[in-house]
Amino acid sequence: MVGTGGISRTTAGDLHQTENLDLVAVASRTIDNAAEFAAEFEVPRAYGDYDALFDDDDVDVVYIGTPIATHADLARRALLAGKHVLVEKAFTTTAAEARSLAALAAERGRFLMEAMWMRFNPAFRRMLDEVSAGAIGDVRTVQAGFGIPFPPSWNIWRPELGGGALLDMGVYPLTLAHLMLGPPEIIRATGELRRDGLDVTASVFLRYGEGRFAQALTSLAGFVNPVATVGGTEGFIAFDQPFMSADSFRVETPPDGEPRTVTVPLEGAGYVPMFRAVGEAIAEGRLEHPWRPLAETIAVLETMDEVRRQLTGDPRRRGRG
Ligand SMILES: NC(=O)c1ccc[n+]([C@@H]2O[C@H](COP(=O)([O-])OP(=O)(O)OC[C@H]3O[C@@H](n4cnc5c(N)ncnc54)[C@H](OP(=O)(O)O)[C@@H]3O)[C@@H](O)[C@H]2O)c1
């Protein structure tokens, strides 16, 4: 585990619960933080230097839970040291960085994946099964959002660390859109940038032809309810809870069908199924997981590149803050 911040504290317990992985070491930029984290979360070894962990022969897989702008370089160093790598979302700040990491992992024969835990959640997988089985007909629409006004001291407000609403939170609605409808034909984005270029809000419309579209909203200025709806020709599926970590959803087929609620519990804090899947894929000698292939991560990053290009291109969208 690399980094001792918020996500590492959230996922350490789930790593302990994952029966095919052992949490053997943690690395921080300071040995004091690493030692404190190791004591609190019962991690056998603590390093005050990320490269020391990459050089540990007992470590097979590195989980990178640091700010987004640091992901590409740390993942590259871990791959060069011969490790398999799981990288927190958003995988990198640009699609170009992701393509270069994907090429390196393939060249070195190492597993590489974005930690898109939503895709592995049991309720989310059941939703995909329902859609494949035709529960709502052909998918035509996706509507999803996620926004939290995090305190100004948080790293999400620091552009040099890969902050901004889009990469950190917008990645979820856009990943849902890509999973249900694929890469869009047309992208239209509007939103507000801070004077230093940090994206504070984004409203994204993706068009696919044949009446299909997705709408994704994100904001650091205020809450955006993290619910989602997938609409089809015969009905719709609604996540009334945060869709990335939901344990249930509703299937509606108006006008005659009775609404049906499907419930599938989370495991641990929600990350166990993803960690288990990573362990299984590596044990099977796979270099990617079929549920989160690098091509899909790269496609979402291409959409986010274009969204930020459109936001940056219009000076009227710059705020005063
Ligand atoms: N999957 C999820 O549910 C979820 C939830 C929240 C966040 N995330 C993702 O997890 C990643 C980390 O987010 P977070 O909220 O955990 O961040 P955070 O609390 O700010 O922690 C990031 C950690 O990264 C390390 N780090 C390395 N270089 C750094 C730098 N230049 N400045 C600051 N810290 C640096 C620090 O650990 P050391 O001091 O120990 O080196 C720090 O504690 C992001 O990619 C985020 O999108 C995922």
Image (spheres, grey):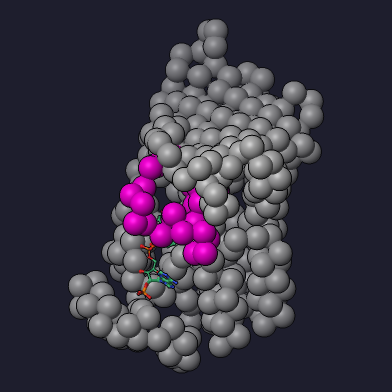
Q: Residue 71 location in percent, x, y? A: 53, 69
- Residue at the image position 64 percent from the left and 27 percent from the top: 141
Residue 171 is inside the magenta segment: yes
Which corner quadrant of the image does residue 297 belong to? bottom right
- Residue at the image position 50 percent from the left and 35 percent from the top: 145
Q: Residue 265 location in percent, x, y? A: 35, 43
Q: Is residue 7 left or right of residue 314?
A: left
Residues shaded magenta: 147-173
- Residue at the image position 66 percent from the left and 72 percent from the top: 101
* Quarter the N terminus occupies: bottom left
Q: Is residue 288 above or below residue 168?
A: below
Which corner quadrant of the image does residue 108 belong to? bottom right
Please say whether residue 125 is visible from this viewpoint.
Answer: no
Q: Is residue 192 left or right of residue 41?
A: right
Quadrant of ligand 1: it is: bottom left
Q: Is residue 179 above or below residue 6?
A: above
- Residue at the image position 48 percent from the left and 91 percent from the top: 55
